[in-house]
Image: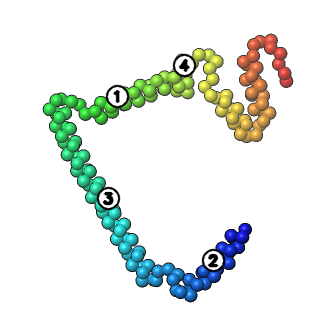
Amino acid sequence: MAAFLAKQMVGNQLSAVKADMGSDGPSAEERARMEEEEQERLAAIQEAEEIRKDKHRKMEMEREKVRQSVRDKYGIKKKEDKEDEKRRQQEAEMAAHLAAINPRNPANQNKLPPGVNTGGEEEDFATKLMNGNLAGATSHVMNKVQSFLPPGFPSFK
């Protein structure tokens, strides 16, 4: 607490002394010069970065030419082509698999075993719940639970 009070008292006096000396920062001319120098520095950094990127781009193009000449000489396919073909084949297999197991797919409607739900009842339940029909939603859940219970199981109402 004492340190805080001392800082407050000395800080105010120190600010007054600085203001009297006129050292409240760089003048307008100095600030303009410093800002101009900063702009020049940023422009030089950006230019150097562009030169570096261009140099690396040229080097990579040369390397790719050498790689391609080796591929042509030995009859090697480009690695990216093999990976792309493999990836496309896997994606096609996955899409076919997903379409085959999707119960909402119209082509699979006849293949479903009896009693398998395609989602219509859940949507009906959700609609009842969203519309505020709590009694209808509750009765829907009760019917669903009773459908899973064995016949003759004591029920509650």
Dot 1 or dot 3: first in sequence order is: 3
> Quadrant of the image for the N terminus?
bottom right
Query: Toward the viewer: 16 or 89?
Result: 16
Q: Amino acid at mark 1?
A: Lys
Residue drawn at x 62%, y 28% is 119
Q: Does the CB distance between marks 2 and 3 fall below 8 Å?
A: no
Q: Estimate the spatial distance between the alpha carbons at disc 3 and disc 4, rounded to whole Å.
A: 63 Å
Residue that mark 2 sits on:
11
Residue that mark 4 sits on:
110
Crowd class of label 3 (few under 14; some 14 to 19; many from 20; radius 10 Å):
few
Would you say 6 lies left or right of 105 here?
right
Crowd class of label 4 (few under 14; some 14 to 19; many from 20; radius 10 Å):
few
Place residue 5 in its image quadrant: bottom right
Query: Toward the viewer: 1 or 37?
Result: 1
Question: Foreground mark, 3 or 4?
Answer: 3
Residue that mark 1 sits on:
86
Q: Amino acid at mark 3?
A: Glu
Residue drawn at x 40%, y 76% is 34
Q: Which mark is residue 49?
A: 3
Q: Estimate the spatial distance between the alpha carbons at disc 1 and disc 3, rounded to whole Å.
A: 37 Å
Q: Quick check: 133 above or below 12?
A: above
Place residue 44 in its image quadrant: bottom left
Dot 3 or dot 4: first in sequence order is: 3
Residue found farthest to the left: 73
Q: Amino acid at mark 4?
A: Asn
Q: Amino acid at mark 2?
A: Gly
